[in-house]
Image (cartoon, rainbow, N blue to C red):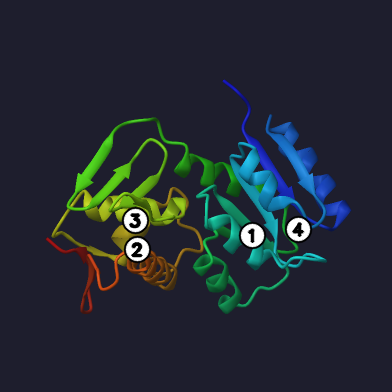
Amino acid sequence: MASQKILIVEDEENIAEVLIAYAKQQNYETEHFNSGKGVVSFVKQNAVDLILLDLMLPDVDGTELCKQIRVFSSVPIIMLTAKSEEIDRLLGLELGADDYICKPFSPKEVIARIKAVLRRTSQPKTNIINHNNFQLHKDDFEARLNGKSIGFTAVEFKIFLLFISHVGRVFTREDIINNVYSDTTDISDRNIDTHIKNIRKKINDIQAGLNPIAAVYSVGYKFKE
């Protein structure tokens, strides 16, 4: 089995060196950029299994890089940042990050998060789900509406897959967390609400006014029949 490739975008050389060393100990291949320059074009031209993306870069802001990558790719992104306030965490998730780690951190924690995210996104190939004008390719985490790619992150895809596989069933936020995440540490109801908001926006960007996920007051969410 080929090694999985981790792209590390981190301008602090000492941190980057430690992350590279720990990743290689786990048999991951690594590529390193010490700034945002060239990152987007690299991701477009090369197969990458996960990106560790520093939020505070010297040239291009990490949030801007995340937005640019999400236009064409659902590759898992873990943001690294010195900002610990919840608003910053939610901002990262809204931009399409799959996880968010605050500095200072243990390299072992980063490796554990990488493994958890890759477990969620590296499921065996299965089949395609069609429902109305939606088409979900479960093997590569691709969702389409009217033939157009919706651009879900891996977490958004898994949430949407959960709903579309159980049309009409009401899921509490706790249900969603337990079904979607292998590691539920630090995942809150707010995180789920943010993901639902992002899913709705991306669907509306393709078909205005379409809202297949309905809120059920004081309970959770369901996919409308």
Q: How far apart are marks 4 and 2 (CA)?
A: 29 Å
* Rendered location of residue 171, percent (x, y): 23, 62
- Tag 1: residue type? Met
Depth check, mark 3 against mark 4: the one in front is: 4
Res 98 visible: no
Q: Quadrant of the N terminus?
A: top right
- Of mark 2 and mark 3, the one earlier in the sequence is 3
- Of mark 4 and mark 2, the one earlier in the sequence is 4
Residue under the point 16% across and 55% down: 167
Q: Do the residues labelled 4 and 2 touch (CB within 8 Å)?
A: no
* Residue 159 quadrant: bottom left
- Of mark 1 and mark 2, the one earlier in the sequence is 1
Q: How crowded is mark 2: few (under 14 residues within 10 Å), some or many (20 or more)?
A: some
- Tag 3: residue type? Ile
Q: Are marks 2 and 3 in contact (CB under 8 Å)?
A: no
Residue matched to label 4: 36
Residue matched to label 1: 79
Q: Distance between the residues labelled 3 and 4?
A: 30 Å
- Tag 4: residue type? Gly
Depth check, mark 4 against mark 2: the one in front is: 2
Q: Is residue 147 above or below residue 137?
A: below
From the viewer's perspective, is 70 left or right of 126? right
Residue matched to label 2: 206
Secondary structure under the numbered disc 3 in the rendered image:
helix
Residue matched to label 3: 159
- Of mark 1 and mark 3, the one earlier in the sequence is 1
Q: How far apart are marks 1 and 3 (CA)?
A: 20 Å
Q: How far apart are marks 1 and 2 (CA)?
A: 27 Å
